[in-house]
Image (spheres, rainbow, N blue to C red):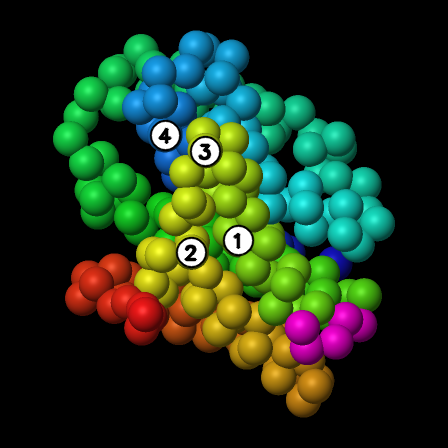
Amino acid sequence: MSMELLTQTQAMYFASLAGGIAFALSGFLVGARNKLDWMGLFILAFLTANGGGILRDVLTDRPPSILLSNEPFLVAFSVTLIAGLLKLHHKDAIENRWLFVLADAVGLVAFAITGSLVALEIKAPFFGFVTLAFLTAAGGGILRDILVNRVPDVLHSGFYGSIAIVVAIAIYLLGMAQMVNHASLLAVFVGALLLRLIAYRYRWQLPKL
C-alpha cells in the first residue's frame, strides 16, 4: 500500500469517526427528548451513526462493517454514556454549536464519499451512486426519525441530503474520467464540506410548495 493511499485511508477513517460521534450524539439527543430509557438511547445513537452504512452494505451484498469490528458499538456506547453523564440533553440547542455542526458536516461528506466509492467499486450506474451516497450519509438519521415517529429531518432540512447527491455526482463524473485519486477526492471533500457549512450559515433551503 502506497503512502498516499494510506494517508487517504487514514484521513477518511478519522473523518468518518468524527461524523459517527456527531451522528451518535444526534441520536442520543433525539432519544433523550423523547424520554427513552438507556437502552433506547443507545439503540438510537447506534442506528443514527451506523444505519446508513448497514443499509449500504446490505444493498451491495457486503458483510456489514458493524459485524467486523467492535468499534461502532464502543463509539455509540461511549457517546451515550458520556452525553448522559454530562446531561448534554439539558443544554440548549447543542446541535447549533459550531463544533457539532462541523463534525456533523464532516461525517455527512465522509459517509457520502464512502458510499460513492462503494458504488464505483461495484460499477453502479448513475442512480446507484446517488442512492448509495445518500443512504450512507443520511440513512441513519432517517432510521432515527422513523423510530421516534417524526418526519425525517432530511426531507425538510434544505442542503443536507443534497450535499450527498452533489458528492455522488462529482465522484461519478470523476470515475467516468478515470480521475479518482487522492487529490480529486480531497477536492470533493473540501468543496462539499464548505458547501454544507455555507448552506448552514446562510440557511439555504430548497424550494417548497
| Mark 3: amino acid | Asn
| 3 or 1: mark nearer the eye | 3
Magenta segment boundaries in residue numbering: 123-127
| 4 or 3: mark nearer the eye | 3
| Mark 1: amino acid | Ala
Residue under numbered circle 3: 149
For the residues labelled 4 and 1, the Cα–Cα distance comes to: 18 Å
For the residues labelled 2 and 4, the Cα–Cα distance comes to: 17 Å
- In primary-sequence order, the first of circles 3 and 1 is 1
Give residue 164's mark: none
In percent of the image, x 45 and y 19: which residue is there? 41
| 2 or 1: mark nearer the eye | 2
Label 1, residues with CA under 10 Å away: few <14, some 14-19, many ≥20: many
Residue 7 sits in quarter: bottom right
Residue under numbered circle 1: 137
Give residue 30's mark: 4
Q: Position of residue 193 (x, y in %)?
A: 38, 64
- In primary-sequence order, the first of circles 4 and 3 is 4
Q: From where the camera sits, is residue 17 visible?
A: no
In percent of the image, x 26 and y 23: which residue is there? 89
Residue under numbered circle 2: 155
In percent of the image, x 39 and y 60: which residue is there? 160
Q: Is residue 190 above or below residue 76?
A: below
Q: From where the camera sits, is residue 44 visible?
A: yes
Badge 3 vs badge 2, beta-carbon distance below 8 Å = no
